[in-house]
Amino acid sequence: MKISNGVNQKIRKAIIPAAGFGTRFLPATKAMPKEMLPIVDKPIIQYVVEEAVASGIEDIVIVTGWHKRTIEDHFDYPFELEKRLLEAGKEEQAEEVRRIGEMANFIYIRQKGPYGNGTPILNARRVIGDEPFAVLWGDEFIYSEPPRLKQMMEVYEKYGAPNISAVRVPEISVNKYGIADVSDVAAGVYKINKIVEKPPVGKAPSNLATHGAYIMPPRLFEILAETKTGKDGELWLVDAITRLAKEQDVYAVEIKNGKYYDTGNKLEYLKAVVEFGLKHDELRGEFGEYLKNLNHEV
């Protein structure tokens, strides 16, 4: 079943929820948003924004809280900083800070309503309006070529179906994710029959984890507004998508050439820092040697 709600519209807007407290990273996140933790020399959320922009997104709607002002400052246009850098002859750095502020049209909304990952999406309803939209979490990303969201948008344009990004995970790790029970549609594209949240190892319907990025129709807002709070008294996005899937097909898009970085937990965050450090032009040689020597010392 195809979408009858906004299917011919180009996806121009993306919602990035970023209002959580980041308690797993305390005390570092006591005064700094978890989304601003650096992966080498860029905060996590910048990787997410860059993915959206590289996929053709024009408007970035970031849903924040009272403790997230640093995110707004980061994507602002820093005239004084640019001027200082230019005066010091640091043209490359000046160009970079200017580029960050000009990447997209940034819109900020303060989160209101019950806890849960469905709340920030519902908060963005008036800004998105009656058109399809993307959702990407601000503290995790999939690094791929072409960009994850671009791959999803191509599937949306071809099939007219809302979809969720998906990656294969080891069988031993299925109990950490929402795992999809699917039917084949095409190579790397699947119809979601249901999503089983954190199934026990050996009981999962597949090893296809669906999470991280979503392309949804405006109908989802109506469903979220009608959805009652669920587990732990929170408003859950998955509950709304489950209801949407009863009205129309929802697809899983297995991301090609993708690596998932769950930077919302300490171990995976450290792994991401190391991997991106080894990809960094200025650091890879010396940093690689350091890691080799460190390995001998441990």
Image (spheres, grey):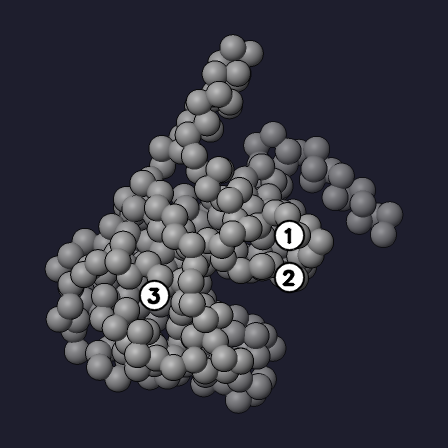
Image mark for residue 23: 2
Type of amino acid at the residue the image marks with label 1:
Thr
Q: Position of residue 18 (x, y in %)?
A: 48, 55
Task: Tell me what residue is drawn at x 53 percent, y 89 percent.
Answer: 203
Question: Is 130 on the left-hand or right-hand side of 236?
Answer: left
Please tell me how crowded label 3 is: few (under 14), some (14-19), or many (20+) other residues with Cα within 10 Å.
many
Image coords of residue 231 (percent x, y): 50, 82
At 70% from the left edge and 33% from the top edge, which residue is drawn? 286
Quick one: label 2 or label 3, which is nearer the N terminus?
Answer: 2
Q: Is residue 31 above or below residue 225?
A: above
x 26%, y 58%: residue? 126
Direction from residue 291 to residue 90 in the image, left or right: left
Q: Residue 187 bears which disc, if any?
A: none
Secondary element type, mark 2: helix
Residue 122 is marked as 3
- Is 35 drawn above or below residue 167 in the view shown? above
Residue labelled with disc 1: 29
**Alpha carbon of mark 2 to alpha carbon of mark 3: how far?**
23 Å
The x, y position of residue 76, in whole percent, is 43, 34
Which of the two residues, 122 or 280, is positioned nearer the viewer here?
122
Query: As rendered, which of 203 and 48 lies closer to the eye?
Result: 48
Give me the C-alpha separation between circle 3 and circle 1. 25 Å
The correct choice, above or below, for 95 with respect to 177 in the image is above
Work out whether residue 1 can be spotted: yes
Asked where in the image residue 213 lies, by quadrant, the reply is bottom left
Earlier residue among tags 1 and 2: 2
Amino acid at circle 2? Thr
Q: Secondary structure at mark 3?
A: helix
In screen coordinates, is 49 left or right of 233? left
N-term mark: 3 or 1: 1
Distance (Cα) linking label 1 and label 2? 7 Å
Type of the residue with mark 3: Leu
